[in-house]
Image (spheres, rainbow, N blue to C red):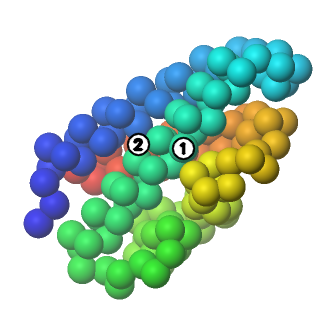
Amino acid sequence: MVNRAILELRLERLREYLSILESVLQYDVTRFTADPFIYGTAERNLHLAIECLLDIGNHIISDSGYPKPETYADIFRILRDREVISPSLLQELEGMAGFRNLLVHDYLRIDREKVYGILKEKLPSMKRLGEIFANLL
């Protein structure tokens, strides 16, 4: 059985990371890409937010007895297959697990403009998934 307190802590941290990412978006792409403090803050908090979503999703899958994911991307697909998230939300989150891998393992190839674009595009979907997870607890 999943420890509810652990999941609540992860959700709390997720909200914190997402709030920081929203603050980063007050800057335009030029300032974002030029300032190492801003883009560094964004990259790290984006990584942590994705980790939280994957971790919570994996806990829900495990606790519900759903099939075990073989990859990070499978987590979101399994949640869609079990109607925890909608097909449209899955589509909006597409690529986030792969981008997590880039942030962690291939960080020298990170395109700062791409990070900015991902934040603009994906942040609302990440927030929505966090709300779905919170409602499941």
Query: How far apart in space, not on screen, are marks 2 and 1 (Cα)?
Result: 18 Å
* Residue extending furthest toward the front: 108
For disc 2, the neighbor class at 10 Å (few under 14, some 14 to 19, many from 20) is few
- For image coordinates 71% across by 15% down, the residue present is 26
**Residue type, numbered disc 1:** His
**Residue type, numbered disc 2:** Glu
Closer to the observer: label 2 or label 1? 1
Which quadrant does the N terminus fall into?
A: bottom left
Q: Position of residue 116 (x, y in %)?
A: 76, 34
Quarter of the figure with residue 126: top right
- For image coordinates 59% across by 25% down, the residue present is 41
Q: Would residue 52 be visible to someone looking at this image?
A: yes
* Residue extending furthest toward the bottom: 67
Q: Position of residue 29 (x, y in %)?
A: 84, 24
The answer to whether 35 is drawn above or below residue 83 in the figure is: above
**First in residue order: circle 2 vs circle 1:** 1
- Please state which of residues 3 and 133 is positioned toward the viewer in this rendering: 3
Give the left or right position of residue 10, taking residue 117 as reference: left
The answer to whether 112 is drawn above or below residue 51 in the figure is: above
- For image coordinates 64% across by 62% down, the residue present is 98
Circle number at residue 131: 2
Judged from the image, the secondary structure of the residue bearing numbered disc 1 is helix
Count the labels in the image: 2
Judged from the image, the secondary structure of the residue bearing numbered disc 2 is helix
- Please state which of residues 124 and 5 is positioned toward the viewer in this rendering: 5
User: What residue is shown with label 1?
Assistant: 47
Quarter of the figure with residue 22: top right
